[in-house]
Image (spheres, rainbow, N blue to C red):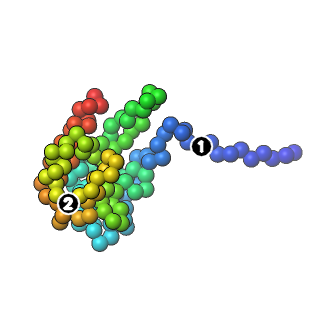
């Protein structure tokens, strides 16, 4: 009798690798944002205030709040966080719909943009009230555009 190995079924190529999961946000922040934990917690609190939803882990490096459906050209949809943040070594990366709100982004203060992301080194570099307004406005407009 011969034994055949069956390869594990791969996840659908249409599904993103970054998925909502049950990992602990506080534990992740304590590890990933060591030395910048206060800023990380403050950004998460801003996202929670903007969406009215608790933060959750997406993949192993993104903290996000609420969801919306991303629609692809081929017609399939996948869930993605409405607003999200990743505490990288060099900066906090915010995944928000800032392009529709360039006027608000100008008021934030010191930041960089790359693709659809905003990079902020520290909250001391920005106007926190302006950042909160940007996150809230971006969350509302993205949610409204997906209805």
On the image, the x and y values in percent for residue 137 come to 18, 42
Q: Is residue 71 visible?
A: yes
Question: Would you call the spot at circle 2 few (<14 residues within 10 Å), some (14-19), or many (20 or more)?
Answer: some
Which of the two marks, 1 or 2, is nearer to us in this view? 2
Q: Which mark is residue 47?
A: none
Q: Which mark is residue 10?
A: 1
Question: What is the secondary structure assignment of the residue under circle 2?
Answer: loop
Q: Which mark is residue 110?
A: 2
Please tell me how many numbered marks the rendered image carries. 2
Quadrant in the picture for the N terminus: top right
**Which residue is depicted at the point 28% across and 28% down?**
147
**Which residue is depicted at the point 27% across and 49% down?**
54
**Which residue is depicted at the point 62% across and 42% down?**
9
Residue nearest the viewer, comparing 63 with 73: 73
Q: Earlier in the sequence, mark 1 or mark 2?
A: 1
Residue nearest the viewer, comparing 97 with 42: 97
Question: Would you call the spot at circle 1 few (<14 residues within 10 Å), some (14-19), or many (20 or more)?
Answer: few
| In this rendering, position of residue 7 left or right of residue 32 | right
């Amino acid at each position: 009798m011969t034994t055949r190995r069956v390869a594990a079924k791969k996840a659908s190529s249409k599904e993103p690798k970054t998925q909502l999961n049950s990992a602990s946000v506080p534990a992740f922040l304590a590890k990933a944002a060591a030395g910048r934990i206060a800023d990380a917690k403050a950004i998460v609190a801003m996202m929670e205030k903007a969406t009215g939803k608790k933060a959750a882990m997406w993949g192993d490096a993104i903290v996000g709040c609420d969801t919306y459906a991303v629609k692809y050209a081929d017609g399939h949809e996948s869930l993605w966080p409405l607003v999200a943040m990743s505490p990288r070594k060099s900066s906090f990366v915010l995944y928000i719909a800032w392009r529709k709100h360039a006027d608000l982004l100008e008021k934030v203060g010191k930041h960089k943009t790359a693709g659809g992301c905003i990079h902020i080194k520290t909250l001391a570099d920005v106007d926190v009230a302006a950042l909160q307004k940007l996150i809230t406005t971006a969350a509302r407009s993205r949610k409204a555009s997906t209805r």
